[in-house]
Every structure is written in C-alpha cells, then in structure tokens.
Image: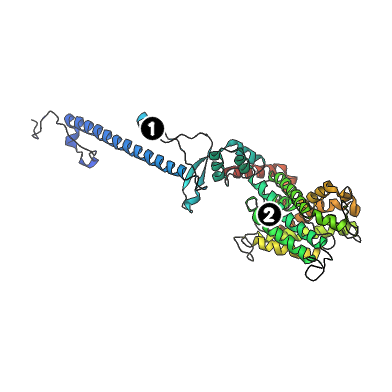
C-alpha cells in the first residue's frame, strides 16, 4: 500500500476515452505505476477506435457497391446515369476498401446531371484519344463532354467515341444542311412553279418574299440544330468570332469544312427532290445558268444582275455581310441593355435579320453573305451537269460571294468593337490590337497566358 491507500501493483482498467489533460496533475505524473496504466489504457482506446474505423470503412464500401450496382442496373433506362468508379487504398492492408479500381489513369470531374446545381462531383474516366483529337481541332476537350464520353466508353462502340470527339463539327454540318435545304427549296419551288395555273392565284406557288421567308426560317432552325457548336453556320462569321471574340483559331478549319460539306449535301438533297421538276421546266437533261431565259442554276447559288459592275457586285455582298455581323455581335453582347441576357430570342431575331437583308439587299446579287452557302452548292451543281459555266458566268463572279462576305463580316465586327463593345476584344487592347502585330513578344506573352487559362478551364 502506498500513502494514498492504493496497491502498488496496477489493476487492469477498462476505458474507452483518453484521460483529459485537465485530469492529469503533478501527483500522478510522478507515479510510474500510473504512467503504465495510462499507456495500457491509451493502447486499448486506439485499438477500439481502429476497430470502429475499420467497420465504418467496410460499411461505406458496401454502400458504395450497392449504389453502383443500382446505377448499372438502371443505366439502360436512364441515359444520363454515370457509372461511378473509384480506387481507394491506404498504407495499411487492413484499411483497404472493396471499391472497384478505375481502368484509366486520366480522370476529370464533372457535375452530375441530376445534381440540380448542388455541386455534386463525380469522377469519370476520360479517353486521351478523344481529348487529344478535340484539342487538335480547337474544341473544348473536357468541359461539355464528360457525360457523353462516359456513356460512349460504357457502350464500347467506336462510333460513339467518334460522335463525342466531333460533336461540334457534326452540329455545324447538320445545321447548315437544314438551312440550305429550306432556303434552296424555297427558291426551287418559286422558280419551277412559275406560271402554274392550278396554284392559288394562278401565278405559281410562292413569290420573292417566299424565298426570304424560306431562308430566314432555315437559318433559325439551323441555329437550333447546331446549338451545341455555337451555331455559326457561316465561315465568315466563324472567322469574325476567331478574330474578335477569342474563338480558338484551330476550330476554324473544322467548322469551315463542316459548313461547306453541309451546304454541299443540302443542295444535293434539294436537287434530288426537284430533279423531275427541273426536267419539266428546262427540258430533259438540259441544265443552264443565268442569263439564260429558263436557267435553274440560281436554285443552288447566286448570280449577279447583268447591269452590275464588278465594284457594284462586291459592294452589295460586302455591305450586307457587314450589317449581318454588326447585328449578330449586338445580339450576343452581354453588355447590350436592349437584348435579353439569356439569348433565348437570338434564333428568332436572326430569322428577321435574314428576311430583312433579303428583302432590301437581295435583288442585285442574290444575297449570299455566306461563302459556304454559295460555294458548296456551286460545286454540287457543277457535278450535276451544269458545267464550267457555274464558274465563268457573270464575268467569273464566283469569287465575290467567297471573298466579299469575309471582308464585310470583319468590317462589321470592327465597327461594333471600336464604337460600342467594351468586353474582351483585340480592339480593347493596347494599340487597338495592332501591338500583337508590331510587337511579336507582346503577342506571344498574351497567347501563352490565354493558352494557360484555357488549360486550367479545360478549353484547350
């Protein structure tokens, strides 16, 4: 017995919590027997806590497996379901969980579709092949495609991966197909039905305003179809956005090719639908271009009025294209208080814009204002039997609907940015953007900084 009435031999104690510092005093600190008891108690507590922690990890792993199995069971019914995979391991073998390991080292994070803005983050695998392909084309390699990419990998279909990698060019392609089919078909119906007595009014099925409505509605619906790509539908507008709105330049070639092919295919669809009417109108196997009396080549592309000079031809396309981009930039300007900020009325406003341009500036040259809309159908018509006159008519007019829209769109964008726009634009940089040209070192620093930010935001 010690002076305090306690046995010198320590007795076993059961305790599930560590003694607090407040309970430790100078009298017990100097007692070696009490120190041994504290060590044994601490070991028991640590063992108990470790046992509880291990059980908790096992329960979490079992819950994760059950949730994952439920997601996989419902994947066929819900295309928006992600297959969540993760790998978790610790330095100690006893804490290793039963969660499945991922099969890819490259991972990205995205918000689940059903999170409704609650910030839930899921880990999904990302294919380096898809990311590299999209990066080379200047497309957003990660941000908008995580869900679709995960579904494509789960399906294991090659075409699903191609669709994810080239989604935006495909959107541009089908948007232009929609626009050209509706626009050129309206021209074909008005022209080929001229003089049809059975038509309402006895003068044919439609008039000049029918063409303007056809093109306006075609542009509006094309914008809806191509919404995921930005819906440019026009190489000249795409070029202007690369120049003034920081659209990646690497995206321009893929978009321009998709737009040209869309116009090419769209005009072919129109020809297939109206080939019998063309034979009836011109004669079996006869294909002519303006200024022939019954020329049908104007169904597909534009031709100038015979009285126009070369400068008049160019200016007509130039001024219409400048107004086009001036209004487009105004409609897409977040600082413009005269528009809806969410842009929900943009396609409808574009319909009225195209209708107005056709009504006021469409007579002299046909109002191409789109290089793809004119060049693609011109190539198609050449292959369908209209011959080399598609290129020589109007004094080799074919190059004006290609060059003038680019010049006009750049000029319209320049006007808007110089006098109205206050956002990010080369015009709102030192020397109105010319410092990038005369000071290559400055331009290189700006380009590197933009590239670095693009990588951080998943844009490049």
Label 2: how many residues lie within 10 Å, few (<14), some (14-19) or many (20+)? some
Kindly identify the residue that appears in the image at 46 percent across and 48 percent down. Answer: 120
Kindly identify the residue that appears in the image at 23 percent across and 41 percent down. Answer: 20
Question: Which marked residue is nearer to the observer: mark 2 or mark 1?
Answer: 1
Q: Is mark 1 on a helix, strand or loop?
A: loop
Q: How is the rendered protein coloured?
A: rainbow
Q: Is residue 113 visible?
A: yes
Position in image of residue 68 (x %, y %)? 43, 41
Q: Is residue 458 left or right of residue 70?
A: right
Kindly identify the residue that appears in the image at 76 percent across and 49 percent down. Answer: 264
Front residue of 438 and 42: 42
Disc nearer the start of the sequence (2/1): 1
Q: Mark 1 points at which residue?
A: 96
The label on residue 428 is 2
Q: How many marks?
A: 2
Q: What element carries label 2?
A: helix
The label on residue 218 is none
Kindly identify the residue that appears in the image at 66 percent across and 49 percent down. Answer: 171
Front residue of 176 and 87: 176
Position in image of residue 279 (x %, y %)? 84, 55
């Amino acid at each position: 017995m010690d002076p305090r009435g306690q046995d010198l031999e320590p007795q076993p104690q059961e305790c599930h919590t560590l003694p607090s510092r407040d309970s430790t005093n100078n009298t017990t600190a100097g007692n070696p027997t009490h120190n041994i008891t504290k060590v044994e108690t601490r070991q028991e507590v640590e063992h108990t806590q470790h046992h509880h922690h291990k059980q908790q990890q096992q329960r979490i792993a079992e819950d994760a497996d059950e949730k994952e199995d439920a997601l996989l069971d419902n994947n066929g019914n819900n295309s928006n379901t992600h297959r969540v995979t993760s790998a978790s391991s610790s330095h100690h073998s006893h804490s290793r969980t039963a969660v499945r390991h991922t099969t890819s080292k490259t991972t990205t994070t995205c918000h689940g579709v059903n999170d409704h803005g609650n910030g839930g983050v899921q880990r999904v695998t990302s294919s380096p092949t898809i990311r590299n392909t999209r990066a080379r084309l200047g497309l957003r390699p990660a941000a908008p495609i995580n869900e679709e990419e995960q579904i494509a990998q789960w399906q294991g279909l090659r075409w699903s991966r191609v669709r994810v990698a080239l989604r935006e060019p495909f959107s541009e392609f089908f948007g232009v197909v929609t626009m050209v089919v509706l626009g050129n078909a309206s021209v074909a119906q008005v022209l080929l039905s001229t003089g049809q007595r059975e038509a309402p009014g006895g003068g044919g099925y439609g008039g000049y305003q029918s063409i303007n409505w056809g093109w306006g509605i075609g542009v509006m619906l094309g914008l809806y179809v191509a919404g995921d790509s930005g819906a440019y539908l026009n190489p000249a507008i795409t070029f202007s956005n690369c120049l003034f709105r920081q659209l990646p330049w690497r995206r321009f070639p893929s978009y321009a090719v998709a737009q040209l092919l869309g116009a090419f295919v769209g005009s072919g669809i129109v020809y297939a639908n109206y080939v019998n009417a063309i034979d009836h109108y011109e004669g079996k196997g006869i294909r002519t271009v303006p200024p022939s009396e019954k020329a049908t080549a104007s169904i597909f592309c534009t031709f100038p009025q015979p009285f126009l000079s070369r400068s008049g031809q160019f200016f007509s396309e130039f001024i219409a294209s400048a107004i086009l981009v001036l209004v487009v930039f105004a409609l897409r300007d977040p600082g413009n208080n005269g528009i809806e900020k969410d842009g929900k009325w943009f396609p409808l406003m574009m319909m009225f814009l195209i209708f107005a341009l056709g009504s006021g500036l469409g007579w002299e040259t046909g109002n191409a204002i789109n290089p793809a809309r004119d060049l693609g159908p011109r190539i198609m018509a050449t292959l369908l039997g209209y011959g080399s006159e598609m290129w020589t008519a109007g004094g080799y007019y074919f190059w004006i609907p290609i060059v003038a829209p680019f010049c006009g769109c750049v000029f319209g964008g320049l006007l808007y940015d110089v006098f109205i726009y206050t956002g990010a634009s080369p015009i709102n940089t030192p020397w109105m953007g010319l410092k990038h040209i005369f000071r290559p070192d400055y331009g290189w620093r700006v380009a590197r900084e933009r590239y670095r930010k693009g990588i951080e935001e998943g844009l490049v």
